[in-house]
Structures are given as C-alpha cells and as structure tokens.
Amino acid sequence: MTTMNLTPVSAKNAGIAREWALCQHYGIERTKHDHTAYNVASDVDAGEKQISVKSSKFTLMNGKFCNGCEDFDGIWNIYKTNVHSNTFVYITLDFTAYEMNIEEFERFVYAFCFVDRDSQSNGGRCKIRCRSESKKMLAWLAENVA
C-alpha cells in the first residue's frame, strides 16, 4: 500500500470530491460524475491503473449486482471476480489517498465493512458497506503503508 496527499476539490458530495481530487492528481479533468457499473469501467482511468475510488461509508457495488447473495464472503467473491479495476484507492476525509492492490483492499474490506441493504425503494438487496472513517481505520491504513 502506498499513500499520497491530494489537493482538496469541491463537488456536490464528499465521495465525488475525493474522486475528482484523484483525477486532478493524474491530470484528468472532470466536470461531471459518471455512474458506470463497477464491472464495466473504473472510476479513474490512469493508463495501466484502472482505479476504484472509495471514501467513508462507501459501498462496493449496488445490491442489484450481488445476485441475491446475502453473506459477506459471497458478495465479496462476486465483487472480486467481476470488478473492472486493478487498483483501489481509499481517500480519507482530509484527502490522504491510500492506494491498494486487490489483496490489500480485501484485507481493508474485511476489517472495516459489513453487510448492509439498499433502501426499499432501490430493492432492499444486500450489499457491502464500509463503516464511517474512524481513528482505528486511519491507524490501520497508516500501519499498512509499505
């Protein structure tokens, strides 16, 4: 795992702001947010790095992609098997970015995520969600930087 400090940017929500800050780091200009599925494209295309950007309280994917699976291991395996990205970046509330490969990201997900549900209006399906950013999470990230 590696880390970098990003320059904060403004956007309509915190997750998009973090994604756009990473884009800015790679010289990619963004003016609107896309909603491409996790298995079709990555949040940031930085050449060899196809990056999935995550921040506090993220979800791995929409519950519709979990194929009715309701257990953590099963949902994770669907994600890991189908995800388009090869690089995963968690960006903290203070815009510190932690870049991980799939194995490092898996350890992070198992340490800080849980099974949640989409809202009833979105089908009520199970999905994996990350907990709110915490001192424990930040300490874990710092301890795992190579």
Image (spheres, rainbow, N blue to C red):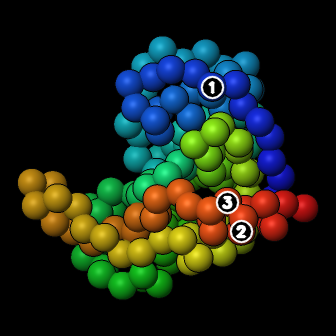
Determine whether the residue tagged by mark 1 lies in a helix, strand or loop. loop
- Which dot marks residue 90? none
Instruction: Give coordinates of residue 43: x percent, y percent.
Output: 54, 39
The crowding category of the residue bearing disc 3, from other C-alpha atoms within 10 Å (few below 14, some 14 to 19, many at least 20), is few
**Residue at mark 2 to residue at mark 3: CA–CA distance:** 5 Å
Residue beneath disc 1: 8
In the image, is 112 to the left or to the right of 103?
left
Q: Earlier in the sequence, mark 3 or mark 1?
A: 1
Q: Are marks 2 and 3 in contact (CB under 8 Å)?
A: yes
Q: Nearer the viewer, residue 19 or 134?
A: 134
Q: Is residue 47 above or below residue 104?
A: above
Q: Are marks 3 and 1 in contact (CB under 8 Å)?
A: no
Q: Is residue 108 above or below residue 4?
A: below
Residue drawn 48% across the image and 14% down it: 31
Residue beneath disc 2: 140
* The furthest residue to the left: 121
**Residue at mark 2 to residue at mark 1: CA–CA distance:** 23 Å
In the image, is 72 to the left or to the right of 2?
left
Q: What is the quadrant of the C terminus in the image?
A: bottom right
Q: Is residue 22 visible?
A: yes
Determine whether the residue tagged by mark 2 lies in a helix, strand or loop. helix
Instruction: Give coordinates of residue 97: x percent, y percent.
Output: 71, 44
Q: Nearer the viewer, residue 131 or 58?
A: 131
**Residue at mark 3 to residue at mark 1: CA–CA distance:** 18 Å
Determine whether the residue tagged by mark 3 lies in a helix, strand or loop. helix
Q: Nearer the viewer, residue 136 or 14?
A: 136
Residue drawn 40% across the image and 68% down it: 128
Instruction: Give coordinates of residue 95: x percent, y percent.
Output: 65, 37
Residue drawn 63% across the image and 39% down it: 94
Residue beneath disc 3: 138
